Amino acid sequence: MKEPMRAYLRLGTIHHVSYPYDPGASGGDEAVKLETLKKLLTDGAFDAVEMGHFSDPAIRARAIDMIRTAGVDAVAFGGQGLTLGAGLNVNDLDPAERRRAVGALKAGIDEAYEFGARHFAFLAGRYEDATVEASLAALAESTRELCVYAAERGDMTVEIEVFDFDLDKKSLIGPASRAVRLAELVAPDHPNFAIQVDSSHFPQLRETPEESILPVRPWIRHAHIGNAVVRDPALPAYGDMHPRFGFPGSENGARELARTLRVLLDANILNEKDRPIVSFEVRPQPGEDPDLVLANAKRTLNEAWLLA
């Protein structure tokens, strides 16, 4: 593409993935998150930021003030960790357990509104092949409840992220076909429902960018871009680990990212009117410097844009 990338998207990154927080190393002091957040907010490459849960309300308030001071108004909130970390499942067939998961995500929506986020993302839980239909019905019920809850408080989009279905997270949503079925169950009555895609998950789903994006195109509001290792479980960073672009044995580099960008452009998901958030989901692997990994992502995206 010859046109400037910023004309078609707002570039962001996921704060807690680019700079993973280690409570043990910090002594449980969340203030260290503010140091890395400042790196992102003072980086002119980013027009958006994606936040995660802050346990300390005082530290959270400082983070919110930093975002406002920096003038970043494109904010998203990742609620995936709220269920993953607690072992909760929004499509649990036990109604009490499902309500626990929905309750945790509702608390996440409240926190997302504190941050001024316009997008709240979550993921489906694990499932059994024999109970796919029942699990899908339970997920649809949970998703409707979350959409209603978010709509009662503002104009936030509630987005289910498409994950792998049999490799790492083993989420009910994966593959694209099941994402479509969920959308058909929820979207007609809940216009704030959306689907989030991630290029790091395409290889995990064994889907091309076209196969992952085009079926759910009507419901995509923002996207993640990243990488994955899927060829051999013995390889470092195998699974849903989001290594840097070009990581040994991985699937995505500039050419693969260019293909994803071209599909998003041709589908008018990236466009000059809406300029959706497109965020890196890249995680430093053991021994890697987070700043260098993020620099790698920006250079790879710049090259991919020229190739798209």
Image (spheres, rainbow, N blue to C red):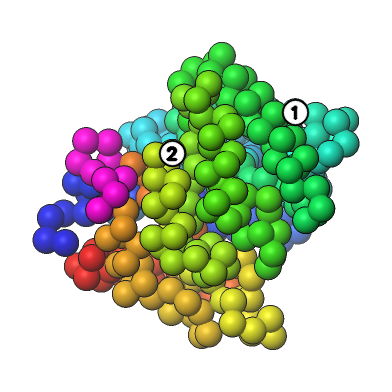
- Is residue 203 something one can see in this rendering? yes
Q: On the rendered structure, is 269 left or right of 35?
A: left
Check the image and report above or below for 202 versus 191: below
Q: Examine the rendered structure and indicate whether residue 61 appears above or below residue 229.
A: above
In the rendered image, which residue does mark 2 sit on? 219
Residue 103: which numbered mark, if any?
1
**Start and end of the magenta stretch?**
265-275
The one nearer the camera, 270 or 144, is 144
Spot occupied by residue 141 in the image (x, y as percentages of width and height): 69, 29
Which numbered disc covers residue 154?
none
Q: Looking at the rendering, in which quadrant would you find the C terminus?
A: bottom left
Relative horizontal placement of residue 168, taking residue 48 as reference (left or right): right
Q: Residue at x 51, y 79 (%)?
A: 250
Side of 69 relative to 267 (left or right): right
Label 2 sits on what residue type? Trp
Kind of residue sitting beneath label 1: Gly
Sequence-first tag of 2 and 1: 1
Q: Secondary structure at mark 1?
A: helix
Residue 273 is inside the magenta segment: yes
Could you say where residue 259 lies in the image, as x and y percent from the top left? Answer: 32, 67
The percent coordinates of residue 248 (x first, y second) are 51, 85
Q: Indicate whether residue 236 is drawn in magenta.
A: no
Using the image as rendered, state which of residue 265 and residue 241 is in the foreground. Answer: 265
Front residue of 300/115: it is 300
The residue sitting at the left extreme is 2
- How many neighbours does mark 1 have within 10 angstroms: few (below 14), some (14-19), or many (20 or more)? some
